[in-house]
């Protein structure tokens, strides 16, 4: 349910932006407003999650101050193993993630302003 709602908000934002570009009119919904709406609708990182292929992207941090939003996004592949290089063997080995955790695959921090910068 959460994934579908987030996708609808972002798809709506994309459609509004494309329409705005074609008609040379300002968009009615900014990415700033879309992010605030997503954050207000979903509580906690497990509900602010989107599946992109086999990777999961979650909003793990959100801070709002005046007219600027700060977001921290992380990406991971559930149950993905990482290669390790043992010092006592020539063969590489795969190491599974710890229980109740996944290995970080990527991260991004972004500042989103209500006003154009």
Image: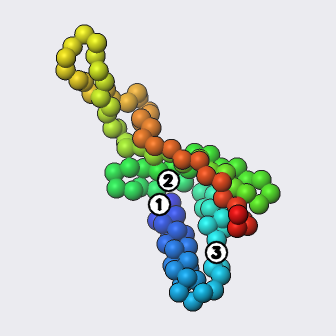
Q: CA distance from mark 3 to mark 1?
A: 20 Å
Q: Residues within 10 Å of mark 2 (few under 14, many from 20)?
A: many
Q: Is residue 92 above or below residue 105?
A: above
The percent coordinates of residue 64 (x first, y second) are 73, 53
The percent coordinates of residue 73 (x first, y second) are 54, 48
Q: Secondary structure at mark 2?
A: strand
Where on the picture, by quarter, is residue 68? bottom right
* Left or right of 65 in this view: 51: left
Disc number at residue 13?
A: none
Q: In which quadrant will I find the C terminus?
A: bottom right
The residue identified by callout 3 is 29
**Is residue 111 in sight in this rendering?**
yes
Which is nearer the N-term, disc 3 or disc 1? Answer: 1
* Left or right of 19 in this view: 36: right
The residue identified by callout 1 is 3
Q: Secondary structure at mark 3?
A: loop
The percent coordinates of residue 95 (x first, y second) are 31, 26
Which is nearer the N-term, disc 1 or disc 2? Answer: 1
Marks 1 and 2: CB-CB under 8 Å?
A: yes
Q: CA distance from mark 1 to mark 2?
A: 6 Å
Q: Secondary structure at mark 1?
A: helix
**Is residue 37 in sight in this rendering?**
no
């Amino acid at each position: 349910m959460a994934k579908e709602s987030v996708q609808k908000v972002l798809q709506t934002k994309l459609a509004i932006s494309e329409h705005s570009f074609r008609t040379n009119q300002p968009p009615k919904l900014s990415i700033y407003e879309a992010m605030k709406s997503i954050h207000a609708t979903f509580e906690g990182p497990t509900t602010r999650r989107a599946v992109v292929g086999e990777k999961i992207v979650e909003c793990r941090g959100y801070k709002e101050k005046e007219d600027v939003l700060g977001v921290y996004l992380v990406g991971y592949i559930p149950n993905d193993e990482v290669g390790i290089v043992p010092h006592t063997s020539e063969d590489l080995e795969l190491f599974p993630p710890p229980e109740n955790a996944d290995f970080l695959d990527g991260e991004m921090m972004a500042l989103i302003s209500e006003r154009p910068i």
